[in-house]
Amino acid sequence: MKIAFSAPDLPKSGHLAITVAADRSLGAFGAGLDKSSGGQITRAMEQGRFTGKAEEVLTLVAPTGVEIGRLVLVGIGGAPGALAANNAGAAALAAVQYAGESELTLVVDDHAGLAIEAGPFAAEVAFGALLRSYRFDKYRTTLADDKKPSVRKVVVQTAAKGAKKAWEKLEKIADGIFLTRDVVSEPPNVIYPETLAERCVELEKLGLEVEILDEKKMKKLGMGALLGVGQGSSQPPRLVVMKWNGGAKGDAPVAFVGKGITFDTGGISIKPAAGMDDMKWDMGGSGTVIGLMAALAGRKAKANVVGVVALAENMPDGNAQRPGDIVTTMSGQTIEVLNTDAEGRLVLADALWYTQDQFKPQFMVNLATLTGAIIVSLGNEHAGLFSNNDDLAAKLTESGLATGEKLWRMPLSPAYDKDIDSDVADVKNIGRPMNAGSIIGGQFLQRFVNGTPWAHLDIAGTAWSKENKGMVPKGATAFGVRLLDHLVATHYEG
């Protein structure tokens, strides 16, 4: 979908959307249109009980004398900031996305009391509309016309300066988000370790340095845990390293590590058949890291950043890892594999150790669709946050609130270590049944960070949505791209 900016001017076709602040507060454009229509907008708001609260929408037949298909009033609430702007843009597009017209004019009126400058606010409205426009229709060949989005262009009108400048950065972040949604949405016969690694190589055109470690290189490094997960598949595992050098030469990078199980049957500890198709997005953590690196490179972030994704397919063939196997990790620690369906922590064990060993980062954040237990705890509204560093945890929480990609900190404690102490190896990959499952996952990973400031984001409940929510259409969410971009921009760019 195309985004354009212009000064406020009543369109002669398409749909028109106007922002309305709390208490039905119209800006200059909206007030002028209301006056010329004899107060039709005010009466419609009163009759529709529309107050202008955030994300509230009222769709009207076009007022008298206006040559447009329909008028949409979209609320921004009181003292709105970037997130309110994003949600307003998304709500406006959602109201007319399938209504037949090809163009939406979205007037971001001159409201008082904005939490950010008016120009960037308008750009954030456009950002929300663009994110909501995403669809993965690549493989749909018989979709009826009335099921296809009709809006192909959104013209954001604002009298404020600075919108286009702010948009330059936001558009690149959107590119990264769409890349994440694309790779997570692809079927597992299209995206597997080798092809996902190839998608990473394509990012070299943005200035990223990309290195792929194959089985031979990983074996030489001693990555027995990652290799063990992939040994049952005909698709060989890969570890991909992406580097963006936008900061001062010699400055330690920040690092992001993603779990990339491109399809997870559970291995020998096989999952139930019902719902197993969802396991194509068990590489959601790696998808987020890939999209984040594309966003940072696209907007030329002034930071040194490393992205590492551990890619494997977990399958149950005659060569597959067995419950009871013991593998040796790159760290030298041994793992008793009691359940082959607890495989994400195995690939991350080697990926985390490799990242801290090779790059000596300021911190590491890993993302993983790690446990169903986090969904039991937090549902689909928050991702679980586990960390050995209070400052990093606080910064991540702050960025989550700012972007709407919310985190909830969960505990780590030596008291949980006894649950994963093994009788025959250094650690076992599961704890007791039905006992702190997501915490045990974090506790396990902590053994492979070697004291580096670190956070683990369990995104099992947030990587995929079964319904449309604001800026996020049904399907792959790209949870974490905006959050981590905000983290880097706010705290780690020079």
Image: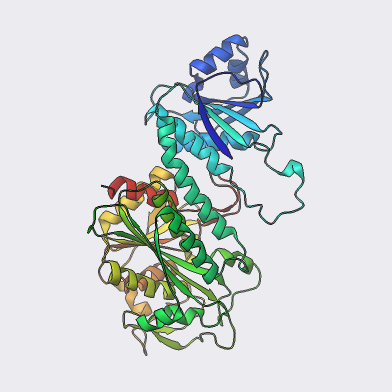
Residue 442: percent from left, percent from top: 38, 68
Count the numbered circles shown.
Answer: 0
Query: In which quarter of the view is residue 119 placed?
Result: top left
Residue occupying image coordinates x 44% and y 32%: 164
**Where 2 sits versus 419, above or below?**
above
Q: Is residue 30 left or right of residue 217?
A: right
493 left or right of 64 in image:
left
Q: Is residue 129 left or right of residue 402?
A: right
Furthest residue toward left: 250
User: Residue 292, percent across and down?
Assistant: 43, 54
Residue at 59 percent across and 40 percent down: it is 1
Where on the picture, by quarter, is residue 96? top right
Name the residue rendered at 63%, 34% in the picture: 95
Residue 33 position (above or below residue 375)? above
Residue 192 in percent (x, y) is at: 56, 69
Above or below 155: residue 86:
below
Q: Which of the two residues, 463 or 136, is positioned nearer the viewer here?
A: 136
Q: Going by the picture, which residue comes out furthest to the front?
A: 205
Please name the colour scheme applied to the rendered image. Answer: rainbow
Q: Work out whether residue 429 can be spotted.
A: no
Name of the residue lying farthest toward the bottom: 424
Quadrant hosting residue 355: bottom left
Q: Residue 405 versus residue 287: which sits nearer the camera?
A: 287
Q: Nearer the viewer, residue 25 or 349?
A: 349
Percent from the top left, x then y, of residue 361? 27, 63
Q: Work out whether residue 377 can be spotted.
A: yes
